Image (cartoon, rainbow, N blue to C red):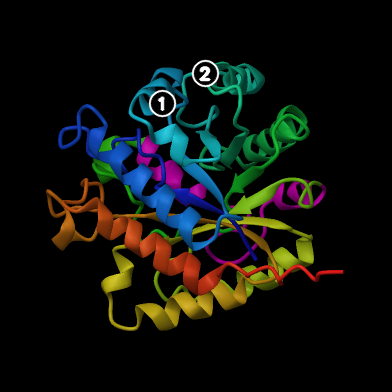
Amino acid sequence: MIEAAMIWNEPNNKSHWDPEIDPEWRGYADMVIRAGNAIFAANPAIARVLGGMSPIDPSWVERMGDLGALDAVDVVAVHGFPLDWNLWPILAWPDKIAEIEAVVPKKPIWVTEVGVSSFGAEEVQQFGIERTAELLIGRVPRIYWYSLFDLPHAWGATTRHKEAEGSSYYRHFYMGLIREDGTPKPALDHYARVADQMGLMQWFHFEDPRLDDAVAIMKRLGVRHLRTGLSWADSFRPGAVEWFDRQMEALADFDVTLTFCFTPEHLGHAPHHTSAPRDPQGFADFCSWAIDRYAPSVALPARVRG
């Protein structure tokens, strides 16, 4: 079941939205408003989530409010990786949540991506998941651990500068609870203890061969909440609808937060997935199509008159 739709992924991260093309965030805000309205029109029961910010930045949220984007969403989401990429300690998680609550006091805050890589040592990941659970379970309504699987090295990470980022780039490949060869890391047992309270965030690539294994493992762990995505760019591939149908059918037993993101190269101001689209209504139409197909609004029966 789809319970929420996220509008983009980490828009304030240069790896996912190009600030040179949209320096004042007007393009992104316009896209959020269009997409939020389209999702509501398709199914008003779906929670609309402002794409998980990374870094956590109250001033960016205030800018979204100034541009009207917050009026088109129901939830504000944050991402945090204090043991890998962020310049703040893991114990600061409650303070980071409070910073965003202070500027959007009437909307819930979700942590839609939090994780710790095993790049340096698997024991660090094990510590990270235990401490994250202690700090965030009960503090926010939704938490999604990133991720179930390590990213295969042959696939490459979705960043703008690749290997030039140094160890920051290579940490992307070690965020999973399960290694690339399919063997579990020590942190998997610790995650299993909180799987019913802390969801998983797992991207599935186009025609991802890991889909069925992921579903079986998540059910065995007792996962209830899952965040994943549908790529607007992928929707132009041959066989896209068939793959989307297969993915969403496989995930039907979970409460899914579905992330819509990635600009098709031929529709951006620049030929890159981080580019603002030339026509933001096209993105909104994709969101509407996906909700209508995978989470259609159910008309309430007519009231019986006595």
Quick one: label 1, few (<14), some, or many (20+) residues within 10 Å?
some
On the picture, is 50 further left or further right than 144? left
Residue 202 visible within the image:
no
Q: Mark 2 points at which residue?
A: 103
On the picture, is 52 further left or further right than 44? left
- Residue 99 magenta: no
- Residue 170 magenta: yes
Q: In this view, does 298 lie above or below 10?
A: below
Q: What element carries label 2?
A: helix
Q: Residue at x 58, y 67 (%)?
A: 297
Report the residue that reaches farthest toward the right. Answer: 306
Which quadrant holds residue 181? bottom right
**Residue 65 - label:** 1
Q: Please state the horizontal and vertical placement of residue 227, each as a whole percent of the image.
A: 57, 54
On the picture, is 226 further left or further right than 138? left
Q: Which residue is drawn at 35% across and 33% down?
A: 12
Q: Which amino acid does label 2 sit on?
A: Val
The one nearer the camera, 201 or 269, is 269
Residue 11 visible within the image:
yes
Numbered range of the magenta stretch: 168-193
Which quadrant holds residue 16? top left
Report the residue that reaches farthest toward the front. Answer: 306
